[in-house]
């Protein structure tokens, strides 16, 4: 049976999935930090975690310790810049607090996890992932702290967000040995009249920018899958494949 530990660290609620056999072993484990309370592996939403653990038991994947972080307000914490809200009218805005959130992950949360659990703390073994805005903040954080997060997963990352393509373009050219997996549905944003119409073009543009900045087809993977909507189930279906590509494929 898959169980999760619900932990409170300061005011933040965490959901921690320990690997099978953690309590009986002395082994140290790779850690993946996941946005939105680790919705990518939530057993109530998909069978991805069960699939991952089966692959681990069969020797096709290493064992992982997953840390799910519950946002206070994802529209504020997961957005790099303040912007007008496209879903709600009035004075509601996207808060643009991503830099503060990323610093929290690096300077507070990761040291806490490394001190409480048997982790492999170096960047090579530390991942960060999320879906939608969670994919956006994961890439943003990893590019800000490339020595901390060596593995990046962006599932239908919301790169339609205004300014993010220019921000990636302005990042210095450097290769820190990171690996990134990105995916997006081929028809996401089609028919939209707001910024979401740029969902697929901006995902493709960011991938090409990464290739121009030291990544290669061996360290950056992008999959455009068949979907005419922003679909969690279809996006998360690629998680086991993403983990294999990030952690096993040389």
Image (cartoon, rainbow, N blue to C red):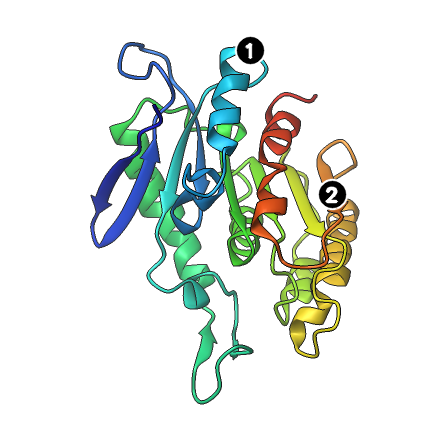
Q: For mark 1, what is the residue?
A: 59
Of the pair 23 and 189, the residue shown nearer to us = 189
Q: Looking at the image, can residue 214 be seen? A: no
Of the pair 114 and 26, the residue shown nearer to us = 26
Could you tell me which residue is drawn at 74 percent across and 43 percent down? 223
| Relative side of 202 to 7, left or right | right
| Relative side of 126 to 237, left or right | left
Q: Which of the 4 image quadrants contains residue 218?
A: top right
The answer to whether the residue labelled 2 contacts the one labelled 1, judged by CB atoms less than 8 Å apart, is: no
Measuring from the top left, give residue 198's x and y in whole percent.
Answer: 72, 68
Could you tell me which residue is drawn at 46 percent across and 37 percent down? 41
Measuring from the top left, give residue 179's x and y in whole percent.
Answer: 64, 35
Separation of residues labelled 2 and 1 (CA atoms): 25 Å
Could you tell me which residue is drawn at 68 percent across and 39 percent down? 175
Q: Looking at the image, can residue 126 be seen? A: yes
Q: Which sits earlier in the primary sequence, circle 2 or circle 1?
A: 1
| Relative side of 206 to 143, left or right | right
Relative vertical location of residue 20 with respect to residue 177 in this rendering, above or below: above
Is disc 1 placed on a helix, strand or loop?
loop
Of the pair 103 and 82, the residue shown nearer to us = 82
Name the quadrant of the N terminus.
top left
Q: Which mark is residue 222?
A: 2
Could you tell me which residue is drawn at 50 percent across and 65 percent down? 79
């Amino acid at each position: 049976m898959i169980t999760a530990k619900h932990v409170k660290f300061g005011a933040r609620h965490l959901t921690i999935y320990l690997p099978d056999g953690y309590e009986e072993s002395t082994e140290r484990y790779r850690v993946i930090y996941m946005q939105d309370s680790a919705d990518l592996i939530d057993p109530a939403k998909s069978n991805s975690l069960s699939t991952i653990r089966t692959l681990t038991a069969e020797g096709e994947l290493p064992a992982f310790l997953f840390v799910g972080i519950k946002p206070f307000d994802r529209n504020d914490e997961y957005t790099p810049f303040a912007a007008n809200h496209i879903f709600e009218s009035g004075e509601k805005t996207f808060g643009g607090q991503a830099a503060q959130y990323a610093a929290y992950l690096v300077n507070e949360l990761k040291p806490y996890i490394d001190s409480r659990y048997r982790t492999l703390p170096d960047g090579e073994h530390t991942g960060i992932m999320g879906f939608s805005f969670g994919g956006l903040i994961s890439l943003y954080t990893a590019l800000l702290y490339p020595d901390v997060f060596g593995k990046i997963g962006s599932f239908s990352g919301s790169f339609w967000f205004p300014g993010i393509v220019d921000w990636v373009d302005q990042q210095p050219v450097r290769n820190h040995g990171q690996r990134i997996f990105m995916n997006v549905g081929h028809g996401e944003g089609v028919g939209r009249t707001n910024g979401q119409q740029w969902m697929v073009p901006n995902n493709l543009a960011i991938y090409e920018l990464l290739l121009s900045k030291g990544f290669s087809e061996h360290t950056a993977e992008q999959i455009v899958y068949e979907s005419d909507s922003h679909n969690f189930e279809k996006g998360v279906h690629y998680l086991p494949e993403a983990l294999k590509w990030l952690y096993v494929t040389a």
